[in-house]
Image: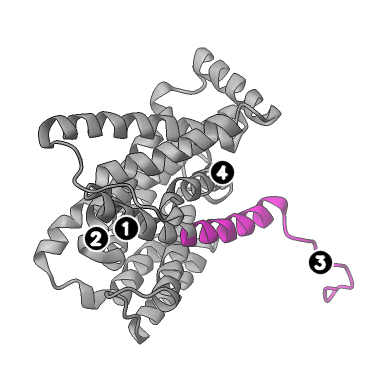
Amino acid sequence: MSATGTTAAPPTLPTTRRIAGVGLATASGVAVAVQSRINGELGVRLADGIAAAVVSFGLGLVILLVLVPATPGGRRGLVALRTALRDGSLRPWQCLGGVCGAFLVATQGLTIGTLGVAVFTVAVVAGQSGSSLLVDRAGIGPTGRQPVTPNRLVGAALTVLAVVLAVGDRLGDPAALALALLPLGAGVGIAWQQAVNGRVRAAADSAMTATVVNFTVGTAALLLTLVVEVAVRGRPAGSLPNEFWLYLGGPIGIVFIALAAAIVRFTGVLLLGLATIAGQIVGAVLLDLLLPTSASHPGPTTLLGAALTLVAVLVAALR
């Protein structure tokens, strides 16, 4: 009850969905951290990051090609997508978000074995935070133009600062930082991918349809890259591992892409990216604590950095 004796109005539906979207995006960020560990290890086993990305994306695509046409919503989404492309309400270039997703998965396999998850995450975060501001300002996502408010600027800056704080002791190797340009570019692409996938989801009225488009485009790009690589360098030196968990990167990617396409219309690209980053940091800390590797050493600064990312998301979410 308020001071005037009337019952306070409940939160508006958009605000409720926005809060729920932030929670789901944070959970999907934890999944991305797990996916990074899986695809990085798969790249080491195959001795080829591109081949690992093809396996990850390809398995995800196979699952989607079985699942989406088998559901009424999936079939309706495919019909709506074709209609949107035909009448011009959806542009063909807006269906190319999967190229950025493929590049991110490829960089996981190519760099994590050398950089480790920590430096990889720093580079992705730096690219994603800055790019999200520009993508929102340009109105590429389904929410249209989003103003670059002081809160959003502070939130993006705090996110980068928090991740640098969390892994600052891993940034002293110049060679590693040069290699980190790959995930930096992948981070820039993530914001654009989330925006255009949101457009596809809106046109098809189906997050799973947007996801199958993403995986189809990404797998095609990766297969083409692998063919060129094999022609130039020969076949990968490694072999397919026996552990089943090393093949879960694709299914995890399905969950991440579908969630992002579904909730970006409620959160905007920047807030979606910041919440995902928060989940990535929390997930990375949990992985290092519960499933440590030889490079895992989360200390007080790592935990402080993880907490600061959550603060950054809250700051950016404030109206």
**Whole-percent x, y for residue 167 in the image:** 28, 74
Instruction: Say what secondary structure mark 4 lies in.
Output: helix
Q: Quick check: 117 above or below 25?
A: below
Question: Magenta region: which residues?
Answer: 1-30
Foreground mark, 3 or 4?
4
Q: In this view, does 103 lie to the left or right of 262?
A: left
Give residue 58's quadrant in the image: top left
CB atoms at circles 1 and 2 under 8 Å apart?
yes
Are the residues at dot 2 and dot 4 in contact (C-beta closer than 8 Å)?
no
Crowding at mark 1 (Cα within 10 Å: few <14, some 14-19, many 20+): many
| Residue at the disc numbered 2 | 113
Q: Do the residues labelled 3 and 4 touch (CB within 8 Å)?
A: no
What residue does disc 4 label?
265
Mark 4, Cα crowd under 10 Å, few <14 / some 14-19 / many 20+, is many
- What's the distance in space between the residues labelled 3 and 1, CA to CA? 52 Å
Amino acid at the residue labelled 4: Arg
Q: Which of marks 3 and 4 is nearer the N terminus?
A: 3
The amino acid sitting under disc 3 is Ala
**Identity, as a three-letter code, of the amino acid under mark 2:** Gly
In the rendered structure, are the residues bearing label 1 and label 4 in contact, judged by CB atoms less than 8 Å apart? no
Q: Tag 1's secondary structure?
A: helix
Provide the residue designation for mark 1. Answer: 41
Q: Which marked residue is nearer to the observer: mark 3 or mark 1? A: 1
Work out how far the residue at label 1 is from the one at label 4, CA to CA, in angstroms: 34 Å
Name the residue at 47% across, 40% down: 60
- Name the one closer to the observer, 34 or 144: 34
Residue 206 at what x, y percent from top left?
A: 61, 34
Q: In this view, does 171 lie above or below 199?
A: below
Asked if residue 107 lies in the magenta stretch, the reply is: no
Which residue is found at the position 32% from the left and 53% from the top?
Answer: 42
